[in-house]
Image: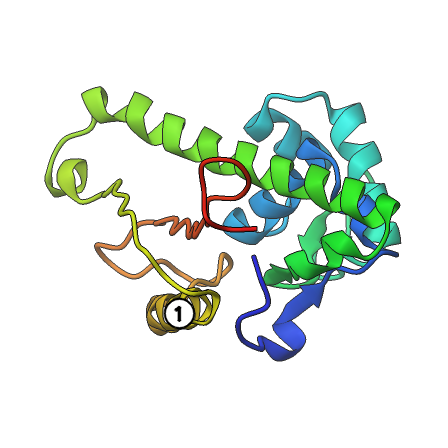
Amino acid sequence: MSDYHDDGAEAVRLDPRNLKALAHPLRVRLLGALREYGPATPSMLAERLGESSGSTSYHLRQLAAFGFVEEDPGRPSKKERWWRAAHRVTRFDERRLGEDDETALLGAEFLRAVAAAHASRLSDWIDGLPDSSGEWRYAGAVSDWSLRLTPDELRALAAELEAVIARYRRHDPEAPATAGAAMVVAQLQLLPRLGPGGSGC
């Protein structure tokens, strides 16, 4: 989520003005669903996320007001709007958490919403393991390592890992799927220990 490399026009960068639009768990999930699965209507998103269509419709309008989503002109409909993500990536520089109290509060809520979405994906994967079969059943990985690094080393590690992931990122939700391929979510978390019990300050 941090600003390790430039995604150009494909990225939206969070600032004190637009951060408030994403400091909400459902809005983070809606934006993620549009990026992963492609354009959808509020009803389609409601069914996918287990929400009401009134709720998804409202929060999509809020996301649109800040430029995170937009109506899909290729799918006009008199019955229900089709929405699509306006960018592929969201970038948030955690250093902005120290700018002022409001930005710190909104930034923390945004990061909590992202963390909840990550935890939900992991739980869904675990829940699906007993019913899965074939080569995909054992293709996933959940690992963690404790590393002793300087801040510069941590930033360098993050940049290297993102560069590796970028080499494999060829996802367009509207393009035909490659034979034998499936959606894979890569969740990158590099968490220095802060406060008591850790050496980070």
Quadrant assignment, res 171: bottom left
Q: Which of 47 and 137 is in front in this view?
A: 137
- Neighbours of disc 1 within 10 Å: few (<14), some (14-19), many (20+): few
Specify whether residue 71 is in view: no
Disc 1 marks which amino acid? Glu
Q: Which of 153 and 183 is in front in this view?
A: 153
Q: Horizontal placement of 132 versus 176: left or right?
A: left
Q: In this view, does 159 lie above or below 30?
A: below
Query: Residue 59 at x, y = what percent?
Result: 80, 36
Colouring convention used in this rendered image of the protein: rainbow
Q: In this view, does 176 lie above or below 129?
A: below
Count of marks overlaid on the render:
1
Quadrant assignment, res 130: top left
Quadrant in which the N terminus is drawn:
bottom right
Query: Residue 25 at x, y = what percent?
Result: 67, 33
Identity of the residue drawn at 23% across and 26% down: 129
- Name the element at disc 1: helix
Query: Residue 13 at x, y = what percent?
Result: 71, 65
Extreme residue in the left direction: 134
Q: Nearer the viewer, residue 41 or 78?
A: 41
Q: Nearer the viewer, residue 102 or 88?
A: 102
Q: Mark 1 points at which residue?
A: 153
Quadrant assignment, res 79: top right
Identity of the residue drawn at 68% across and 60% down: 95
Query: Residue 58 at x, y = what percent?
Result: 84, 33
Specify whether residue 18 is in view: yes
Q: Horizontal placement of 43 versus 151: left or right?
A: right
